[in-house]
Amino acid sequence: MGIDQLNLFEEVNEKTVEVVPIPDDSPLYKLQEMIEVRQPEPSLDPEDFHYISSFAGKKGIILSIKKLANGKVCYEVEFSNRTSGIFYEDDIKKNNS
C-alpha cells in the first residue's frame, strides 16, 4: 500500500492563487487605468523591496485586478517595454501625467 506525501508547496500555491470575485466599484484603481509604481518602503522584507525597486517610477496600464483569499487586492500592470508585474494597492499610485 503506497502513501502519497503531502506537497506543502502545492497547498500554499493553491491558497495564494485563489481569487474571489470583486465588484467593479471595489478596487481603488480600474482596468486600463494608467498608474505609476511607487518607491518601496524601506521597512519591506528584502525580496519585496528588490522586486518593487526594479519597477519604481515606471508607468503602466492595469491589465487585471484580483482579490486574494487574504483580502488583499492585487493588480497586474503592463509597462511600455511589454513586461508586466503584480502589485498591491500600496505599491502603485495614479499617474497624473
Image (tube, rainbow, N blue to C red):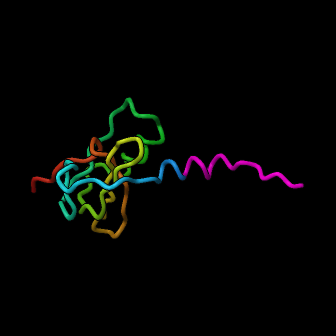
View extreme (right): residue: 1
View extreme (front): residue: 1
> Residue 4 in the image: x percent, y percent?
78, 53
> Residue 62 in the image: x percent, y percent?
26, 61
Which of the image's four quarters has the N terminus? bottom right
Q: Residue at the spot x=45%, y=53% of the render? A: 18
Residue 48, image quadrant: top left
Residue 97, image quadrant: bottom left
**Between residues 5 and 84, which one lies in front from this camera angle?**
5
Q: Residue at the spot x=22%, y=62% of the render? A: 31
Q: Residue at the spot x=38%, y=51% of the render? A: 54
- The relative height of residue 13 versus residue 72 in the rendered view (above or below) is below
Which portion, as a residue range, is magenta?
1-13
**Relative to residue 49, is residue 88 drawn left or right?**
left
**Between residues 70 and 29, which one lies in front from this camera angle?**
70
- The relative height of residue 21 versus residue 52 in the rendered view (above or below) is below
> Residue 47 in the image: x percent, y percent?
48, 41
Q: Residue at the spot x=62%, y=49% of the render? A: 9
> Residue 7 in the image: x percent, y percent?
69, 50
